[in-house]
Image: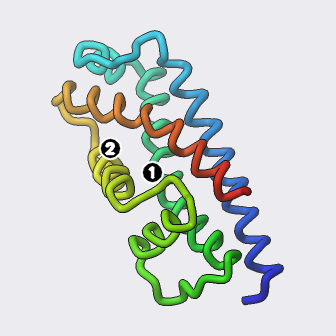
C-alpha cells in the first residue's frame, strides 16, 4: 500500500472518530443533568423511549469508536513506517504507546470489557448499567486526547 493510500485511510478514520466522538458528547450532554447515573435513573431511562434512544446511541457510538480506533492506530503506525501487516491489535496498542499515544494494554482491555458489557441487551440490573455508563463518560477525555495525539 502506498503512502498516499495510507494517508487517505488514516484521514478517513480520523474524520470518522471525530464525528462519532462529537455525537457521543452531544448525547452525553443530553443526559448530563442526571450524572452520575444511579439505578433509579436508569430504570426511568429504560421506560422512556427518548432516553432509551439516547442510551442506544451512546452505546453504539462507544462501540463504533473503539472498533474504528483499532483501524486508526493501524494506519497511524503505517504512516510512522511500522510494519503492522500481521500484528495483533494488542501489539499495535503497545507499539502506539511506545510512540507516545495515550493508550495501553490495560486501557484497551478496560474499553473492551465496557464494550462487551454495553453490547448486551439492557438487563434489569440497573446498578450495573449505571456503573457502565458512568465509566463510559470517563473515556471521552481519553478519546479526545488519543485523536489529538495521532493527528500530530
User: Which picture quadrant has residue 47?
Assistant: top left
Residue 98 lies, in percent from the top left, at: 50, 67
- Distance of mark 1 from mark 2, alpha carbons? 8 Å
In the image, residue 141 above or below residue 34 = below
In the image, residue 30 above or below residue 5 = above
In the image, residue 84 above or below residue 144 = below
Residue 133 lies, in percent from the top left, at: 35, 31
Which of disc 2 and disc 1 is earlier in sequence? 1
- Asked if the residue at tag 2 contacts the one at tag 1, i.e. Cβ–Cβ closer than 8 Å, the answer is yes
Residue 1 lies, in percent from the top left, at: 72, 89
The residue closer to the viewer here, 54 or 151, is 151
Query: Residue visible at 55% across and 21% down?
Result: 29
Residue beneath disc 1: 63
Quadrant containing the C terminus in the rendered view:
bottom right
In terms of secondary structure, where does tag 2 sit?
helix
Q: Residue furthest right?
A: 4
Q: Residue furthest top?
A: 33
Position of 65 compared to 115: left or right? right
In the image, residue 1 above or below residue 80 = below
In terms of secondary structure, where does tag 1 sit?
helix
Give the class, few, some or many, for how many residues have Cα within 10 Å of label 2's Cα (few <14, many ≥20). many
Residue beneath disc 2: 118
Amino acid at each position: 500500500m502506498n503512502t498516499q493510500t495510507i494517508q487517505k485511510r488514516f484521514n478517513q478514520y480520523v474524520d470518522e472518530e471525530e464525528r462519532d466522538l462529537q455525537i457521543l458528547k452531544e448525547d452525553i450532554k443530553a443526559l448530563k443533568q442526571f450524572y452520575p447515573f444511579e439505578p433509579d435513573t436508569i430504570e426511568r431511562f429504560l421506560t422512556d423511549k427518548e432516553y432509551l434512544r439516547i442510551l442506544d446511541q451512546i452505546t453504539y457510538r462507544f462501540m463504533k469508536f473503539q472498533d474504528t480506533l483499532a483501524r486508526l492506530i493501524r494506519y497511524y503506525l503505517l504512516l510512522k513506517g511500522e510494519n503492522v501487516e500481521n500484528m495483533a491489535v494488542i501489539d499495535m496498542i503497545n507499539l502506539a504507546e511506545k510512540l507516545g499515544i495515550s493508550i495501553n494494554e490495560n486501557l484497551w482491555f478496560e474499553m473492551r470489557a465496557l464494550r462487551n458489557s454495553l453490547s448486551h441487551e439492557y438487563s434489569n440490573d440497573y446498578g450495573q448499567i449505571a456503573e457502565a455508563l458512568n465509566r463510559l463518560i470517563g473515556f471521552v477525555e481519553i478519546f479526545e486526547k488519543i485523536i489529538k495525539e495521532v493527528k500530530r
